[in-house]
Amino acid sequence: MSAIVNSEDDNGILCGNWSGKYQGGTPPTSWTGSTDILNQFYISQRPVKYGQCWVFGGVLTSVMRSLGIPARTITNFDSAHDTSKPYNRKVDKFYSKNYQLNAQKTTDSIWNFHVWNDVWMKRPDLKPGYGGWQALDATPQEESEGIYQTGPCPLAAIKNGDKSVQYDLEFLYAEVNADVHHYLEEEEGKYVLIKKETDAVGHNITTKAIGKFEPEDITLQYKYEEGTVEERAAMGGEDDTAGDTAVSIVVPTGTPTGSPIVITINLAKEGDEPGTRTAQIHFSVAINYYTGKPISALFDQDICLTVPDDKSIVSHTFTIPADLYIPFLGTDHNFIARAFVYVPEVDQTSLCTSEFDLEDPPINFTVPPNLTVGKIANIQFSFKNPLPVELTNVYLSIEGQGLIKRETHKLANIPAGGTFQDDYDLACKEKGSKYLIVAINANELYGSRAEVLLNIE
């Protein structure tokens, strides 16, 4: 079933696209449900354009449930994509002598998030204890037995790192629990390990809670708690080694899209050898696709700080102007800040990284106070362009289960700093609590979306 949902091998339901260019199809963030996708495929008998992981996951959930097989959609934050053959449960990142990521050599990646599925089934082909929830992934990432498919693999086997269990355990295990190794080029073609992270992958693994429109954390169904003896035993790895100077990067949460990004780096002496430290810092910020692949470098600066012997914190703040990142907001993205710190007193290089997002511009709703079955409700909504550039090729999508089938409308361009306002007459057909979902996409701004809960009496 995971192979049938993607179009790679057999002209299945959905065509993947991570290019940021979606001409001839629908941008992945415009979909608000799987019904329209399945209807399009049924009518045309051709792959529907376009999807990314959360779309593949939603469609596979619908397909499995329609067949009577219990299924749930899973989101894994900081999800590893191990490309090694054979898989080695590691994400390897390589940096040049001038501290730039070597994209050609770095084939592994960490997705900001990734979505797949669990299905509930017996596994008589496996030893006892491996029935129940099984991981499936319809997103075409890597071939399995010559086909773009993943699973089924028992969650119990993934949690314990049981290499004897089929299918695709090593790939799935890495997604939730890989170690991350960072290598810096010392001389031409020779790289040395400067940092190993054992807790950078597999956070807040969630699914929708039963009967509630809120997430349920199921991380401990996929992995043991980070750093425990059980987790390290399942991995088969070693703990991190301590450095001489502690480094942290702080990015304020809630920075609005279109505003400057203010980032603070903090350093403190951690080692026991006496004396101050001279921290030679190369700080950079880049913007990546949500899959971890680079889009563009944004900011680089070299500074030098003196770190006191008393282990107190010394800080420095960087400001990244908005005009550096605004040209790259037209595709799904996130940001990464890196600080390489060389301490000559102990001849040691360390690395600190922090990934972050900006606050999406809100879509605001005005809803009548009393909604009644059989009546028309006038829903008003507005959206303010937060950028100093005009939004072009703007589309609005609206959908709500039990409220309205998905509709897409082409809007007029929204000028810099301008506001779009509209209303919608909604027929209240069913009693109960229903979510109305609205998404806005433009060439210059990717994927603003919001939902409002409507209580119909």
Image (tube, rainbow, N blue to C red):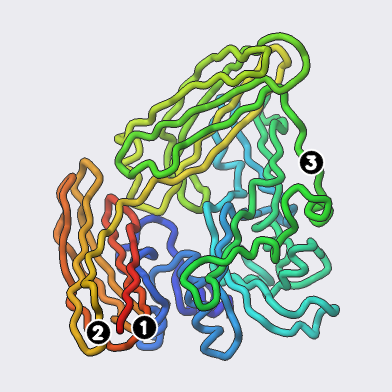
**Marks 2 and 3: which is nearer the front?**
2
Q: Secondary structure at mark 1?
A: strand
**Residue at the (35%, 39%) spot, across then down:** 325
For this view, does 279 lie left or right of residue 231? left
Residue on which the image places disc 1? 432
**Residue at the (21%, 64%) spot, across then down:** 381
Is residue 26 positioned above or below 92 on the image? below
Q: Secondary structure at mark 2?
A: loop
Residue on which the image places disc 2? 372
Image-quadrant location for residue 128: bottom right
Q: Who comes first in sequence, dot 3 or dot 1?
A: 3
Amino acid of disc 3: Asp
Q: Who comes first in sequence, dot 2 or dot 3?
A: 3
Residue 173 picture location, percent across and down: 71, 60
Look at the image and tell me whether residue 187 can be seen. Answer: no
**Marks 3 and 1: which is nearer the front?**
1
Q: Are marks 1 and 2 in contact (CB under 8 Å)?
A: no
Amino acid of disc 1: Gly
Amino acid of disc 2: Thr
Residue 132 picture location, percent across and down: 72, 79
Look at the image and tell me whether residue 436 can be seen. Answer: yes
Residue on which the image places disc 3? 239
